[in-house]
Amino acid sequence: MKLTTNPSPRMRGRLFGILVCFGLLSLAPAARAQWTALPETTLQAGMQLIHAELATTPDQRETGLMYRRELSGNHGMLFIFSTDQPVCMWMKNTLIPLSVAFLDDQGRITNIADMKPQTLDSHCAVQNVRFALEMPLGWFAQRGLQPGFQLRGEPFGTTAAR
């Protein structure tokens, strides 16, 4: 067996491929960690408790629920904006179908939109809002929640039952 300090081009290609794969695998936990690193709150919609991750920064709001493969039951994401403003949502790189409720500063639903995965279609609030709550597709309709319904919870200045 001949030892060499200068590997062949073929061997260098294999080593490079292994290093790239290892590097990509090591990034996967970091990407997933950002999902679990978001603060959470409990909201109340009638008798339903919602466990919502909070997207408060521009980067968090831009990423939202991208690349997630599932969103269970009463889990969602609450997008918080610093002031009442026009808000539109889209589904780029979002793999699961969602419904979004746009909420005023008191937590009152202004309108709800159903959104298809991986589209660039805009789904906009009908008025300026402070919040948008994304839940699994049909979540609001299945519970009879419509525009005018008021959610409760700390972000809206009210307390949710725990």
Image (cartoon, rainbow, N blue to C red):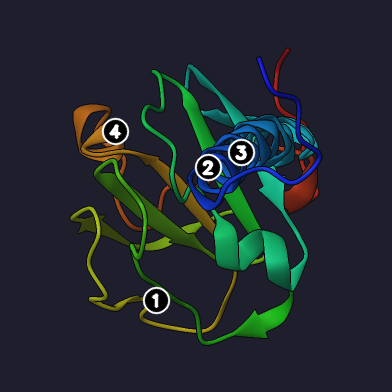
- Tell me which residue sits at (68%, 59%) in the image: 60
Question: Which mark, residue 54?
Answer: none
Q: Earlier in the sequence, mark 1 or mark 2?
A: 2
> Residue 21: horizontal and vertical position, in percent?
55, 37
Examine the rendering and report whether any part of residue 8 can be seen.
Answer: yes
Q: Earlier in the sequence, mark 2 or mark 4?
A: 2
Amino acid type of the residue that numbered disc 1 sits on in the rendered structure: Ala
- Identify the residue position indicated by label 1 in the image: 125
Front position in the image: 2 or 41: 2
Q: Are marks 2 and 4 in contact (CB under 8 Å)?
A: no
Q: Residues within 10 Å of mark 2 (few under 14, many from 20)?
A: few
Q: Residues within 10 Å of mark 3 (few under 14, many from 20)?
A: few
**What is the CA distance from the residue labelled 2 to the residue labelled 3?**
5 Å
**What is the CA distance from the residue labelled 1 to the residue labelled 4?**
18 Å
- Identify the residue position indicated by label 4 in the image: 139
Figure check: 87 above or below 99: below
Amino acid type of the residue that numbered disc 3 sits on in the rendered structure: Leu
> Circle 2 — which element?
helix
> Residue 7: horizontal and vertical position, in percent?
67, 42
> Circle 4 — which element?
helix
**What is the CA distance from the residue labelled 3 to the residue labelled 4?**
48 Å
> Residue 136: horizontal and vertical position, in percent?
32, 35
Q: Earlier in the sequence, mark 1 or mark 3?
A: 3
- Identify the residue position indicated by label 3 in the image: 15
